[in-house]
Amino acid sequence: MTMADQSRDPQAASIDKEWLRNKYREERDKRLRPDGNDQYIEIKGQLTHYLDDPYTPVTPRAPKTDHVTFAFVGGGFAGLATAARLKEAGIDDVRIIEKAGDFGGTWYWNRYPGAQCDTASMVYMPLLEETGHMPSEKYAHAPEILAHCQRIGRQFGLYDNALLHTEVAGIDWDQAASRWRIRTNRGDDFTAQFVGMGTGPLHVPKLPGIPGIESFEGHSFHTSRWDYDYTGGDPLGQPMHKLADKRVGIIGTGATSVQCVPHLAQACKELYVFQRTPSSVDVRDNAPIDPDWFSGIATTGWQQRWLENFTANQAGGTAEIDLVQDGWTDLGRRIRAKIIELPREQRTPQNMLAAFEDADFGKMEEIRARVDTIVHDRDTAAKLKAWYRQLCKRPCFHDSYLQAFNRPGAHLVDTDGKGVEKITDNGVVVAGKEYQLDCIIYASGFEVGTAYERRAGFDLTGRGGLKLSDYWAEGMRSKHGIHVHGFPNAFFVQPAQGANLISNVPHNLTDAARTIALTVSHARKNGFGEVEVTKEAEDRWIELLLTGAGRMLGSPDCTPGYYNNEGREPGPQARLNVGYPAGPNAYFKYIDEWRDSGRFDGLAFR
Ligand code: NDP
């Protein structure tokens, strides 16, 4: 017998921890499946149309065969921040190579209705102080973030040299010339003294491997390639009037679906939301930013102060005030409050973990109780409750997602953890019942955990023909997550093996941009042609990382998802997907000191 949700009072004053632990386990077990990540299918062959760019036509251009000082792969936040810092450092010929038709990275592709930043704009949007942009809302919507990326591109003169709608085919180190050779799918074949990799963790859309997926005869698309021609409306929020007579199904209920379902529910004749695992949906509480308030706080160095404060509050620091005050910092505040209740001598690791669990139970009980206060139909409300710890899956925040299920045309089709059974030429089948549809929208996420070179689209080839895929076969190796031995003059911009701050990924990226600009400037000022982390320094860094508590996300106790390799043993490589053992806050302090010292410890300049 399953543990009926109704068998307990969710508002009960005391939390029945054992009941919850069992319920979490039971719900996880329903979802564990032997194929793990392989349940998703790579978009190729007859499916490649799912990857077409619906937003910008490709313009013909002549191939490049020149030389630049710095080439950066990826025009998202990583590339923009790094290129901006390099420009500030006086390096004029920085070239960004980007597969999309403009800068923006994830914000270029994700234009689905309701797309919005889930981390407060004041800390999420890079280079606010440098550009003088005041975010319009506490949580900015996607069009504003895309426009901000374009603003950075214009302000720092990054468009002139950029190669848009261009995918890298290969980057090889030419030892004789001490430079990188870069080839692309547009026939470019040029060289660069330095290269940067900001290829992004979640940018290759994936489709669920549901039997019959190719047979559907209606319309279909992935959320990251929204087809406004079909739906009507636009990313700015114009209603999707063309859906008024349509039966639409959306597969997936992750962070993307949570944001677009309210808009679909309003627009479609009938909307079917196919759910395998409910997301936890906490309060959003968005609000416009008041220009008077902003001009009061936006004094020199303000964004750095906010970044440090957010990290300290969210990632176990000791900040006395919480400038951002949101759902990310709330759990941190609760854990600290529980720990402070403990006498000092009882603050053992075990008691700390217990405090974390208690805080989490409290938080999730509130989130579940919120469903009951919003959703009218009891059965639908019960199915929308998330039974796992908050950080097992990406936490969501929204103030009209749950409300959408009160609309007569919006139907939750819960699959009790099993997922959609099959797709026919007419629609979607769950538990033997066919739902006839005009359109299927895949809110099925992006590849995570597939090989780096598969997601990047090329295999970086370093000194002596060393392939990055071989060098990282047993897991990523680097110093600071930026420098990799055997790959001189190459810089990686991503969170792992550095701060690994998950709640505000841009903080990791913009910080790495500083390190890179400083390192390149140092090489150039001193006439060095090459810089590379020594093997010894890289080994020491890896040893240090392995002294930590391990992966922050992805406990095997969690319900499956991309945070925990879909519930499968993640393999030995995953133990290296970690951050600085003392946490993000400590990492940012450490790296500041590393930079300020001017010694570039661990790097060899030649
Ligand atoms: P996710 O990978 O989070 O979600 C995919 C969804 O598809 C899940 O609900 C999954 O269910 C479901 N699914 C997969 N296969 C099936 C199936 N066979 N039948 C039914 N359902 C299925 O993708 P998202 O695009 O939602 O989000 C990806 C990430 O992008 C987020 O985690 C976040 O990091 C980022 N993001 C950030 C936003 C922001 O900051 N504002 C907004 C949107 C996304 P199950 O859970 O059971 O696996």
Image (cartoon, rainbow, N blue to C red):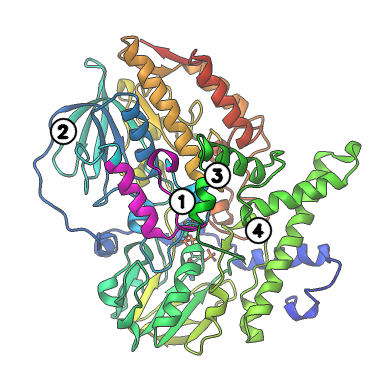
Looking at the image, is mark 3 or mark 2 earlier in the sequence? 2
Separation of residues labelled 4 and 3 (CA atoms): 32 Å
Along the line of sight, the residue nearer the viewer: 584 or 383:
584
Instruction: Give the alpha-carbon distance from disc 4 to disc 1, as whole Å.
Output: 20 Å
Instruction: Specify whether residue 349 is painted magenta.
Output: no
Residue 513, position in %: x, y? 42, 32
Residue 189: numbered disc:
2
Residue 428 in view in this figure: no
Q: Is mark 4 within 8 Å of ligand 1?
A: no
Identify the residue at image location x=40%, y=59%. 142
Looking at the picture, does residue 565 appear above or below residue 476? below
**Between disc 1 and disc 3, whose residue precedes?**
3
Q: Which residues are magenta?
A: 128-154
Q: Which residue is mark 1?
A: 448
Q: Earlier in the sequence, mark 2 or mark 1?
A: 2
Marks 2 and 4, Cα distance to the nearest angstrom? Answer: 47 Å
